[in-house]
Amino acid sequence: MTHDKEHFGPFLLLCLIGFAAFFCAYLRIPVLPLLAAHLGAGPAQVGMINGAFMLTTGLLSIPAGLVADRIGRRTPIVVGLALTAVSSLLVTQCQAPVQMALAYLLFGAGLAAFAPGMLSLVADLVPAHRLGQAYGWYTTAIYIAMTLGPASGGWLAKAWGLRQVFLFSGSALLAVILLALLALPQGPPRHCSELHAVLAGTLGLVRDPRLAGCLLATAGSCVGFGVFLTFLPLYASQHGLDPAQVGLVFAAQAVTNVVGRIPLGTLADRVDRRTLVAAGLACLALALSVLGQVTGLWALVGCAVLMGVGMALTFTSIGALIAELVPALKRGLAMGMYNSCIYLGMMSGSTALGLALKRVGYPAGFALAGASSLCALVLFLALLRGKKGTAAAES
C-alpha cells in the first residue's frame, strides 16, 4: 500500500482486524431471517429486527466517535467488538423475535463503537499523501468481508444449523478482540477538555460547510444504495428474473465496487478528491434513474456495474476527504457522523420508498432515489466550491 515501512505493518493489521470483524458479523446476514421465521416472525418482524440494528448504529455512531476522540481509539473498538460478540451469543438463546430485536440493538451499538474508531485509525496511521490508497485498501478489505461473510454464513447454516452460525460468529469475534488488544495503537494523544469546550468544538465541526457537504454526499448516496439493495430483488422478480439472475446483478455491483476501490484510492491521492466524489454521485444518479426503465438481465447488470463504479468513486474518496478536512483530535467525531449518514441514509431510503411504492411504482421510485444522489451532488459542489483545505497539520 505504501513505501512508508513504519506505517505498513500497523496498517496491515488494521485491515486484517477490519476484515475479520465484518466477516464474523456478516456471517449472520442470511441466517437472521431464517432463524427469525423459525421462531414465528413474519416479514414485518424481520424488518423490525434489521431496523433496530440500523437505527441504533446510526444514532450511536456520533457519540461513539466523540468518545474515541476523548479516550483514544482502541477502547471503543474493543468495546464494539465485545458488544457484537455478545449479541451473537445472545441470539443463540433467543426464543422469540422480540428477543432477537433486543440482541440486535447490541449489534448496532457494537458497530457504532467499532467503525468510527477504525476509520479514524486509518488516518492516524497513514501519511496525508497516502490517505486515498489507505481508504481504498481498508474499505476493500471490509467490503470483501461483507461479501464473503453472508456466503459463508449460508454454507455454515446448511452444514451446522442456524443457531450454530451465531455461536461461531460470537466465538470468532472473541479472537478478534484479543488481536485488537494486542495489536491496535491507541491513536493520537488523548486530550481532556471541559464539557463546554467539547461542545463548542463539536458545533464548530458541524458548522464546517466542507464537512457538511461530505456528509450530505454520504447520506444522499446511501439513500439510493439502500433502495437498490432492498427493492432490486422485487423489481427484477416482477419482470421474470429468477433468484440466480438477481444474484448475478448483485454480484456485478459488488465485484465492480471491490475491484475499483484500490486503483481509485491511488487516483484519489493524485487528483482533487472532490472531482472523484462528484463523478461517483453522478454515476449513482444515472444508474438509479435508468434502473427503473430497463427490465432485461444484461441491462440491469449494466446498471449494477455503474452503481459499483459510483460507490467505489464516492466512498473511497470521501473517507480520505473527511480525514483530510478534520483535525486529528476530532476525526473520531467526524467518522461517527460519516457512519451515521451511511446507516440512516440506507434505512431512510428503503423505508421511504417502501411507503411510497404503491403510489409511485418502481420506475418513479428508482428515479426518486437517483434524484437524491443528484441533489447530494449539487449540495456537495456548492459547499466545497472554495479552496480545498487540509487539517493534517492541525491539532
Image (cartoon, grey):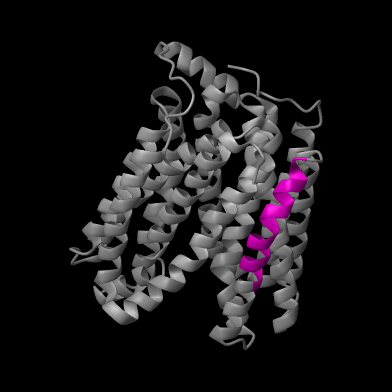
Q: Is residue 243 depicted above or below 23 in this figure?
A: below
Q: Nearer the viewer, residue 249 or 379?
A: 249
**Could you say which quadrant of the image residue 88 lies in?**
bottom left
Q: Position of residue 76 (x, y in %)?
A: 37, 36
**Number of numbered discs overlaid on the protein picture:** 0
**Residue range highlighted in magenta:** 252-269
Q: Is residue 216 visible?
A: no
Magenta: main secondary structure: helix
Q: Is residue 263 visible?
A: yes
In the picture provided, is 83 more to the left or to the right than 390? Answer: left
- Give me the residue at 37% from left, 65% from top: 28
Q: Is residue 200 depicted above or below 156 in this figure?
A: above
Q: Position of residue 367 (x, y in %)?
A: 72, 63
Q: On the rendered image, what quadrant is the C terminus found in?
A: top right
- Give me the residue at 56% from left, 40% from top: 338
Q: Nearer the viewer, residue 386 or 10?
A: 10
In the picture provided, is 20 more to the left or to the right than 392? Answer: left
Q: Is residue 179 depicted above or below 197 in this figure?
A: below
Residue 75 included in the magenta stretch of the image: no
| Residue at the extreme front of the image, as rendered | 5
